[in-house]
Image: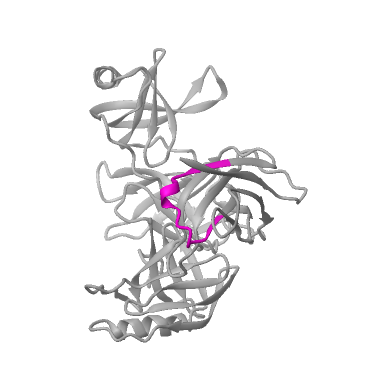
Amino acid sequence: MAEVSGQVFYVERIAAPPNARLEIVLEDISRQDVAAERLGEMVIEPAGQPPYEFSIEYDPAQIDPRHSYRVAARLYDGQDLLFTSDTVHQVLTRGFPATASVRMRRVARRPDQLLGAIPAAFAGTLPSAGPGVETQIHLLENGVYFMRETHLDRDNGTFDDIGRYLVSSDRKQLSLHGGREAPLRFAIEGPDALEMLDRDGARIDSELNYTLERKPQLALPEPRLLMGGKFRYLAGAGRFRECLTGLDLAVAAEEDNRALEEAYLEAREEPGEELKVSLEGRIEQRPSAESPEPVMTLVPERFIGVWPGQDCPPRAHAASLENTYWRLVLLRGSGVERFPNQREPHLVFRDTGEVGGSDGCNRLSGRYRSTGGSIEFSELVTTRRMCAQGMEQAETFVQTLSVANHVRVIGQHLEVLDEANNLLMRLEALAL
């Protein structure tokens, strides 16, 4: 292995937040129609204060002397990008060294979030086929939500869900990513109200009330549900890191905890090793000798199993507009077809203002300008190859880009909308 090293800094007289995260990456930037290929990275969390020294390992066999490589850096506070390198810092080939001094510049602040102060609780009765569903959503400071639904027409009709919430890049929508097949979406109607949307993020065409209102005095529920997570046991105490939320919970030594501990001790190979387990349980707020405030504690009601070698799936997070491979999945209300021996329709937005990709038949390139959620494409051109299939879809794709007015990233999806806020297309982020 070899390494690229150097220093990252910014000159603004601003302290980095206590929990800031710095990401430094080594990328191949030779191709314009695909996202930059990442060859190595270094993440510092918490980052501390600048300047930041870095060293990124890479495989020399991956370096092509005909290609161009750069080091880029970004400093985040949670999901918010604070500083980024906005010039190309080339390394390794074309006469450039294996060291770099990378200056970051402050990113213009987004408008104040409409959601208001967090933590927050919202509640109301949402319409259903019966008398309604009493719904409460609690948004916590760490990006976690607790949700409780009580179906008024059922005995034992209370159901809990937990997960992570994301705010769209335009700050107008909230999505809840938990144990459901698809995330729930809400319009942020100012700091005191959420309006439930359909799965596509559109308003529900109904005279019924789909609004939840802020309830400052609403107590945090103690969710009871099926959970998966990483369990560890050391020094006579158990800890459970829940998969969907990332919450690291103390485990109460009661109910079915004995079965959980015995199965773990039999399956582990090293003391303190984390193993994936599944169980039914509840999360309670309990006093702690180590904290003046109550702490979240898992009460294992029924142990199900331990699964050595398994890991939690990636937790929900928001993709970045730039340097992401965006695959087209919905165009003008219709699903997107893919054809044999042809590239799938996709876009890649460069942080240099260039856009590349494919319309599904021909390569596409041009420029874009995006500010505060608005977007404008210019100089869009494609190659002129005739394709056996998909020409009409390809033409519609390119024509639709010309009338795009703004974009919204929500989770792993990019939505392109027209001036009247109608959805033109949806793309999904793919890992390369």
Quarter occupied by residue 22: top right
Image mark count: 0
- Residue 69, magenta (yes or no): yes
From where the camera sits, is residue 208 visible?
Answer: no
Asked if one can make out residue 186 in the rendered structure from this viewpoint, the answer is yes
Of residues 273 and 354, the one nearer the viewer is: 354
Q: Position of residue 150 (x, y in %)?
A: 33, 47
Q: Quick one: quadrant of the N terminus?
A: top left
Nearest to the observer: residue 91 or residue 355:
91
Instruction: Write down the region rendered in magenta.
Output: 55-70
Q: Position of residue 294 (x, y in %)?
A: 52, 26
Q: Residue at x 42, y 41 (%)?
A: 245
Indicate the position of residue 155 as horizontal and vertical percent values: 24, 43
* Residue 267 in the figure: left or right of residue 248: left
Q: Is 235 displayed left or right of 44 in the figure?
A: left
| Quadrant where the image shows the C terminus | bottom left
Residue ID at (26%, 72%): 338
Tell which of 379 and 15 is nearer to you: 379
Can you tell which quarter of the image residue 247 is in? Answer: top left
Asked if residue 44 is positioned above or below residue 350 in the image, the reply reads: above
Q: Position of residue 374 (x, y in %)?
A: 56, 73
Who is closer to the viewer here, 210 or 55?
Answer: 55
Seen in the picture, residue 259 relative to 64 is either above or below; the reply is above
Q: How is the image coloured?
A: one colour
Give me the residue at 46% from left, 72% from top.
Answer: 356
Q: Which residue is depicted at the point 54% across and 75% down?
A: 368
Is-magenta flag for residue 415? no
